Image (spheres, helix red, strand yellow):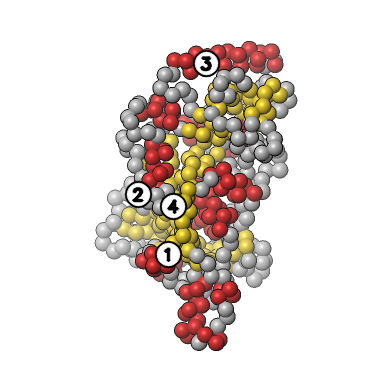
Amino acid sequence: MTRNSVLIAVAAVVATATAARAENADGGPESWRVTGVAADDMLNARMGPAIDFPVIETFAPDERGLELITCVPFHAITHSADMNDAEKAVLPPPWCLMRDADGQRAGWVAQRFITWDDNASRIREATGPSGEGDPIDTLSARFLDGYAPQDILQVFEQILATLDPVDPQPSVFFASARIEPLTMAVLALETAEGQRDRVRYRITYGIEGIPNPPKHGPLPLSFIQVDRFSLGSAIRQKAIDSHGAEHVAPPEEFDAGPHVSWRLITRPVQGTTADIVAAGRTEIPDAQAQKMTCLNNPCLSSGMDVQDAASWGAEEKMTPNPEPVPFQVRRDGLLTPAAAIDDLTRERNFDEQGQQREIPNLPDPFFEAVIEINLAQDSMLDAAMRMGGLKDDSIAAVWRRLVVIPSAENVRIPQRYRAEAYECHGGLKFPPEGRFCQ
């Protein structure tokens, strides 16, 4: 296609979109905003969808209320579901034709520099006027009740600052594009709160399908809570009880800190697996933490409890994940919490676990994971997940365990072991090894 023909096509699209906008009396098209552009810079809008086209307009780094006219290459959610990772990888980087709120400026921008600003118009298209407001806003407010709302752009930028692109070739996608929701939530907590030793993570996960426009499947919203319990104080107290205070190091040597909880809501958008919609943070008082359970064990237990959470099968040695990831994988001879949850959920498909209702509601968590780091005398990470909500008459939940210890042969590559267990609906909770749920 020549540049003249591109200009003709752009003009036709803009004219069509303008007419459609005039006919849309109940709120107009969905709204987008600029993201990832420095405060002293501008987002270039070009004559066509590539950097070799001239710049014809600019958008401010904090510009909001942008209208998305179209993107190339075009593939709807239904098309994405039919494509494998290799097919997606060879697609050219996406560009989107954007127009400002006044309809005066328009041009093509790299998709990674825009993100959704308001989803209300798309939901109205799908559900019609209900007086309930935007379901995403409503559910976000309910999910973050009791949590201090966080600036999602700041959360995203903090995560992005810790990542390294896995592909040396330039890309319009951010390095975070392929990070899964659970991993994104763990990264959000750790990048904001900092690293800690002697901790226990508890992660819960639910999915709610939000109605999409006709001919599209529901939009899956991920609701994730990540709790981090700092057990340095409990371990120190246990040592005092056993050996006396005069023989125990001061609190700072035990890396004691507050118990914190983060909640994130994410959704998939074109080219991004977990776009952050909302985030909140709170501290968990000791009295509340004392009552909380992590896979049926006390969250403030000072020992490694994952080994007793299920009737585990035989442990098998795992090979490292061959696919490169943009986040840090190893730390102090073990996996990072983000790498641990990524490994633990590898090969798990959560698509069928989502709930979809006529009136969207907060989903019940179908997934719980616990990650224990350095709660034993030796350096060790022990993690487990329980995934329920299965469409199976005999199996109530699938359990998986990940054990990570430093390698004596290669300190750069920890040793990883995996075990599984199956929780039955009836009879024995866990069948004997070698037996199946009936």
Q: Residues within 10 Å of mark 3 (few under 14, many from 20)?
A: some
Q: Of discs 3 and 1, which sits in the foreground?
A: 1
Q: Is residue 227 visible?
A: yes
Q: What whole-number distance in Å separates the C-alpha atoms at marks 2 and 4?
A: 19 Å
Question: Which residue lies most toward the left here?
Answer: 427
Q: Residues within 10 Å of mark 1 (few under 14, many from 20)?
A: few
Instruction: Classify the position of the N terminus by image quarter.
Output: top right
**Residue that carries the numbered disc 2 in the rendered image:** 364
**Residue that carries the numbered disc 3 in the rendered image:** 18
Tell me whether the residue at label 2 lies in contact with that at label 4, contact meaning CB atoms closer than 8 angstroms: no
**Residue that carries the numbered disc 4 in the rendered image:** 147
Sequence-wise, the earlier of marks 1 and 2 is 1
Residue at the image point whose x is 51% and y is 34% from the top: 117
Secondary structure beneath dot 3 equals helix
- Relative to 6, residue 211 above or below: below
Q: What whole-number distance in Å separates the C-alpha atoms at marks 3 and 4?
A: 41 Å
* Three-letter amino acid code of the residue under disc 3: Thr
* Three-letter amino acid code of the residue under disc 4: Tyr
